Amino acid sequence: MYSTFNRNCRKAYLINENEIGSFVWSSASFRSYIIGSKFAITVSARTTWQTDLCAPGRKLFSNMTSEAIVLLETVNFAAEKHRNQRRKDPEGTPYINHPIGVARILSHEGGITDIEVLQAALLHDTVEDTDTTHAELEAKFGPVVARIVQEVTDDKSLPKQERKRLQVEHAPHCSHQAKLVKLADKLYNLRDLNRSTPAGWTAERVQEYFVWASQVVKGLRGTNSVLEEKLEELFKQRGLQL
């Protein structure tokens, strides 16, 4: 066991070196992580101190933000869940490329810095396509991330055409955070279709996907002008108008 404390608070915590957990006391939120042989404790919104396990309490450096650590934990979780899955392109690209790409579109192109939206982007297919449960996501990443993922998750028990219809119907009613994930997801998928036709897909099926995606995106308008403009350009290339 190792003790750590926020110098601005009067309460210390004993944290098991094998535990990943969060502790809340007053207005301070504590999160502990095991990173290799280092023990890290978050004591503020943006600063993380890492300490040698053999020397509890010794401050080594504070150049890694808590957001970076949270995103690494999220990427690792998604990678583990999708580890045996591949995309449908002829190359059989590792599936994890997709959620990482969706998160990158949001941050790099959409200018999104909301950590929970980026986490949800990384996790957006875990419930739909793996054995992950909503309760598991909520326990590990919190109710907001779990709720966003739930909003963008199709019910796989329904026929495919019904799932597609419901996406169009539900799009306008999603939260702003879920709409962002949906926009980036569609942008990634449409770019991917332009890059490489999935095995077994005809040109007609690709065009049908673009038509359906345009109907979904219509219900997402007013969410992020940059991403919407990029999508609109892709649709114009296919003779489609939003």
Image (spheres, rainbow, N blue to C red):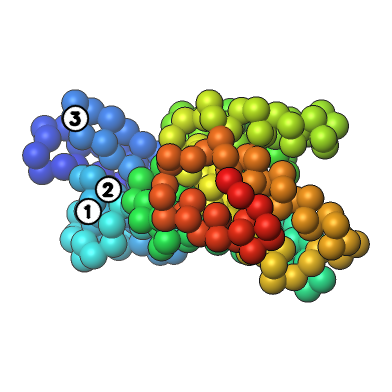
Q: Circle 1 sits on which residue?
A: 47
Question: Residue 9 at what x, y percent from top left?
Answer: 12, 35
Q: Earlier in the sequence, mark 2 or mark 1?
A: 2
Viewer-side residue, 163 vs 150: 163
Check disc 3 and report its element: helix, strand or loop: loop
Viewer-side residue, 111 vs 234: 234
State left or right for residue 69 relative to residue 200.
left
Q: Circle 2 sits on which residue?
A: 42
Spatial CA span between label 3 and label 2: 13 Å
Dot 2: few (<14), some (14–19), or many (≥20) neighbours within 10 Å? many
Q: Earlier in the sequence, mark 3 or mark 2?
A: 3
| Amino acid of disc 2 | Thr
Which residue: 21% across, 62% down?
A: 62
Which residue: 42% across, 61% down?
A: 109
Spatial CA span between label 1 and label 3: 16 Å
State left or right for residue 29 relative to residue 135.
left
| Amino acid of disc 1 | Thr
Kindly indicate whether the residue at mark 1 contacts the one at mark 2 (C-beta within 8 angstroms). Answer: yes
Which residue: 75% across, 70% down?
A: 196
Question: Residue 111 at what x, y percent from top left?
Answer: 36, 56
State left or right for residue 16 relative to residue 46.
right
| Amino acid of disc 3 | Ser
Kindly tell me whether residue 75 is visible in this rendering: no
Spatial CA span between label 2 and label 1: 6 Å
Q: Circle 3 sits on which residue?
A: 27
Q: Earlier in the sequence, mark 1 or mark 3?
A: 3
State left or right for residue 203 relative to residue 217.
right
